[in-house]
Image (tube, grey):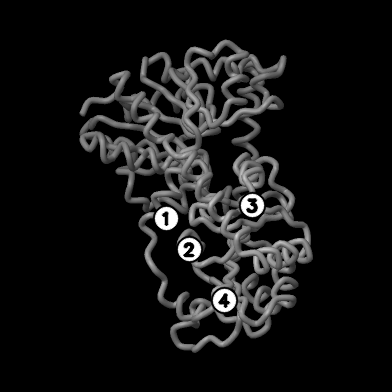
Amino acid sequence: MGVFIYNVFLFLFRTGIGIASLFNPKAKQWIAGRKDIFTRLEHAFREKPPVIWVHCASLGEFEQGRPLIEALREEYPSYKILLTFFSPSGYENRKNYQGADEIFYLPADSPSNSKRFLEIVNPSLVIFVKYEFWYYYLKKIKYRKMPLILVSALFWQKMSFFKWYGALQRKMLTRFDHLFVQDRVSQQLLAGIGLADRITISGDTRFDRVAAIASTATRLPLVEKFIGQSRRVIVAGSTWPADEQLLAEVMADTDPEWKLIIAPHEIDGKHIEQVLERFPGATRYTDLEKNNPTDRVLIIDNIGMLSRLYQYGYVSYIGGGLGKGIHNTLEAAVYGRPVFFGTVYHKFREAGELISAGAAFSVDSADGMMDRLKKFNHDPATWQHAGEQAAQYVLDNMGATKKILDYIEREGLLVR
């Protein structure tokens, strides 16, 4: 893709999102969030503090960058941390995040916007997380000789960087002073286009994040009230209707001692009502305080609890694998319990590795899940082994954040 085609893409994108904003709430947020953005940036950085700028495309990238952001705040407290997002799903969900000093949408990529943004912010270090490559920003950063690193990056052969038509994309990668990648495949692909001297296999910072969450996870008294004396609890997170149907069939085939805690991906009133219809008699979490639950199913109808819920599972089930793709498996695996998910997981490296380790199991039906649960019940050693493998997998892959911090210190990119 040449610069001309890239500019055409930017024009079409801005035009399209402008039209979409008339009827699409997220597109409207994308536009509104950038209104008067330079005035607001100038006010936020009027005192010209030293700045670390971290950019994430969306919420998923933020979760990968979060351990590094929080480590940088602790190690380099004299720097102001600016966190930017491209998408509304990232910004709107994390605009009140306490780990950054300033949180903004990234102004749309253009020669003038990138120039003005960098003049205002003047970052001492720029960190892009995983997937986000904007030509003019990267060009201006390089021109101004600002240190620039990419973290938690993941590449595969089909990406345009490695195709005959990917010259512009490859040029963008050369703007980075260093690229921290998740795996050896990514390293080999980048080495094949001449970047071997600026690559480190650091792993995925999400392992550090989930380990930190698990080590400080607080108890949930109302959930414990629901569980009671049961030792057979399925915790299902980020579920979609297909997952919920499978789990309903599983619960219909299990003994009364089994309980299910289900946290749907969508918790709007309409979907919660659909889940209640699928599990007649189920209890909502928001009703637990006033009710004495007697049913076997608890529906989580609020946000922010999922990572702590997994500590209560005999096994965990991760939603999305019967549709477009699974959600976060690491949040569950860190607690040392076997993990189940559907068959659409191949874009998620950790899912395949958990299966290979004997810690996770892909199922496409209630019968498949029931067969495994029966094996665990009849032979507890197999359940224990799967759980131990899950915890060990997370432990073995921790340390990405430290590798990045070590590089920053070794290269003298920031001053303590």
Residue 390: x %, y % from top left = 55, 50
- Name the front one of labels 1 and 3: 3
Q: Earlier in the sequence, mark 1 or mark 2?
A: 1
Residue at the disc numbered 1: 214
Q: Quadrant of the C terminus?
A: top left
Q: Which tag, 4 or 1, sits closer to the chain's start?
A: 1
Q: Do the residues labelled 4 and 3 touch (CB within 8 Å)?
A: no
Residues tagged 2 and 3 counted as in contact (Cβ below 8 A): no
308 sits to left or right of 373: left
Which tag, 4 or 3, sits closer to the chain's start? Answer: 4
Residues marked 1 and 2 touching at CB (< 8 Å):
yes
- Find disc 2 in the rendering and name its residue: 311
Is 163 placed left or right of 142 in the picture?
Answer: right
Discs 4/1, front: 1
Q: Counting residues from the N terminus, which is met first, the one under dot 2 or under dot 4?
A: 4
Residue underneath mark 4: 298
Q: Residues within 10 Å of mark 4 (few under 14, many from 20)?
A: many
Counting from the top left corner in percent of width and height, residue 11 is at 62, 30
The local secondary structure at tag 1 comes to: helix
Q: Which amino acid does label 3 sit on?
A: Ala
Please indicate, yes or no, whether residue 35 appears anywhere in the rendered image: no
Q: Which of marks 2 and 3 is nearer the N terminus?
A: 2
On-image quarter of the N terminus: top right
Q: What residue type is labelled 1?
A: Ala
Residue annotated with mark 3: 360
The Cα–Cα distance between marks 2 and 3, rounded to whole angstroms, is 16 Å
